[in-house]
Amino acid sequence: EVQLVESGGGLVQPGGSLRLSCAASGFTFSTFEMNWVRQAPGKGLEWLSYISSTATTIYYADSVKGRFTISRDNAKNSLYLQMNSLRVEDTAVYYCARGLGNDYDSWGQGTLVTVSS
Amino acid sequence: QSVLTQPPSASGTPGQRVIISCSGDSSNIGSKAVNWYQQLPGTAPKLLIYRNNQRPSGVPDRFSASKSGTSASLAISGLQSEDEADYFCAVWDDSLNGWVFGGGTKLTVL
């Protein structure tokens, strides 16, 4: 069974940093592209970043470019999102997602990040 | 303001057919495949339709979708109470080099 489990969320002050992790199991992680998507409380979905299976191709949404960094460790079956210079408007549930728009599309349960003083 | 435009709400009675629209432009819907997600309250989004009109295994054939030009639509027939959820369209945008989502449509089953 495909499982994606996010962790690392929590309360952080504006300007602070946080590193999210996504542990993958039940499939060959190294062969799939991955994404981070977030959802602010009561709001819609916002795609943040994409990383190819070998990390050779990376894309970011303009809203996080220069502040967030996506990475992966295929040996550890893990996806990461390093978030720096956090703002109040970054408060959201952060999801990792495999293969958006494909029949193998799959999402984790999400981890809540709250940016507040 | 989302790149893709969806109505914020839709409703229907059990057994009815409901259609949810999603409007974009030539850099997204006009040139790329559209996907639809269902998000039940308190849960993660789940893929409902991929590549314009394909259903993943396990998705009932009550759910169907189509695309024409720069617009797409999701149809739910034989509406059931468990269909009450938020529905999002999503597509890759060539000009942004990223995925874009619609603002979401909250479906209420009356």
Image (cartoon, rainbow, N blue to C red):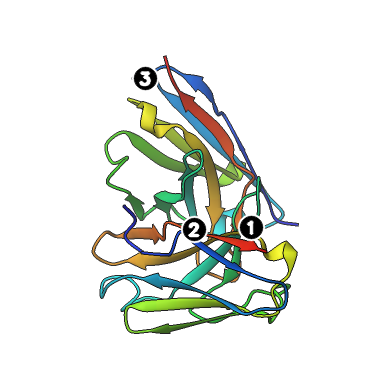
| Same chain for the residues under marks 1 and 3 in the image | yes
Q: Chain of mark 1?
A: A
Rendered location of residue A40, percent (x, y): 47, 40
Residue bearing the label numbered 3: A14
Of circles 1 and 2, the one toward us is 2
Rendered location of residue B102, percent (x, y): 41, 61
Disc number at residue A28?
Answer: 1
For residue B70, above or below residue B44: below
Disc number at residue A33?
Answer: 2
> Mark 1 packing: few (<14 Cα in 10 Å), some, or many (20+)?
few
Of circles 1 and 3, the one toward us is 3
In 3D space, how far apart are the residues under numbered discs 1 and 2 (Cα atoms)?
Answer: 11 Å
> Mark 2 packing: few (<14 Cα in 10 Å), some, or many (20+)?
some
Q: Amino acid at mark 1?
A: Thr
Rendered location of residue A9, percent (x, y): 55, 29
Q: Chain of mark 2?
A: A
Rendered location of residue A74, percent (x, y): 55, 47
For residue B60, above or below residue A83: below
Q: Amino acid at mark 2?
A: Glu
Residue at 35%, 52% (x, y): give it.
A58
Q: Are marks 1 and 3 in contact (CB under 8 Å)?
A: no
Secondary structure under tag 1 reads: loop
Name the one closer to the observer, A115 or B92: A115
| Same chain for the residues under marks 2 and 3 in the image | yes
In 3D space, how far apart are the residues under numbered discs 2 and 3 (Cα atoms)?
Answer: 30 Å
- Which one is earlier in the sequence, the residue at label 1 or at label 3? 3
Q: Amino acid at mark 3?
A: Pro
Name the one closer to the observer, A98 or A75: A98
In 3D space, how far apart are the residues under numbered discs 1 and 3 (Cα atoms)?
Answer: 37 Å
